[in-house]
Amino acid sequence: MVDRLQNQVEKEERDLTILRAVIEDGPIGIVKLSERTGLPEHKVRYSLRMLENDGFVQPTPDGAIPAEDIEERVERINSGLTELIGRLEKLRDDEVEVEATN
């Protein structure tokens, strides 16, 4: 179960890395994003597609740019992350106990 969660967090971390680069350097294309982030081009392409589907970036002939309402969207991300951290801390604190049956 933890492995699935870790894989999902790594994917979201990659998406946020790409989003941050688009916000800071947009318009920016796949090759430059790959160079800037150190991520392979196929992963950059996938993350850009997901970010576009979610409305965070927009494609242009010159490369990806942030959505017009990116400030609001980033606020929601940060708020959601804070809530998620709290939930994960609660899960950690509510330890699962297993009694040995011998």
Image (tube, rainbow, N blue to C red):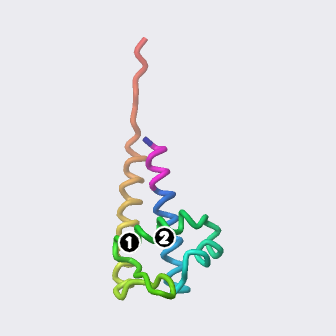
The residue that appears at 53% across and 68% down in the rendered structure is 44
Residue at screen point 65% across, 68% down: 38
Q: In this view, does 43 lie above or below 22?
A: above
Considering only order in the chain, which callout, 1 or 2, is on the residue closer to the N terminus? 2
**Quick one: 61 or 98, which is closer to the camera?**
61
Farthest residue, direction front: 61
Q: In this view, does 98 lie above or below 36?
A: above
Name the residue beneath numbered marker 2. 16
The crowd level at tag 1 (other Cα within 10 Å; few <14, some 14-19, many 20+) is few
Q: What is the x, y in percent for residue 7?
A: 49, 51
Q: Position of residue 67 (x, y in %)?
A: 38, 84
Q: Residue at 55% of width from left, 63% of height from top? A: 42
Secondary element under disc 2, as helix, strand or loop, is: helix
Question: Would you say residue 16 sits in the magenta stretch?
Answer: no
Q: Give the left or right position of residue 33, taking residue 95 as reference.
A: right
Q: Residues within 10 Å of mark 2 (few under 14, many from 20)?
A: some
Identity, as a three-letter code, of the amino acid under mark 2 = Leu
Q: Give the range drawn in magenta.
A: 2-8
Of 5 and 21, which appears nearest the observer?
21
The residue located at (39%, 66%) in the rendering is 82
Give me the disc on residue 77: 1
Measuring from the top left, give residue 1's x and y in whole percent. 43, 41
Is 29 located above or below residue 95 in the figure?
below
**For the stretch drawn in magenta, what is the main secondary structure?**
helix
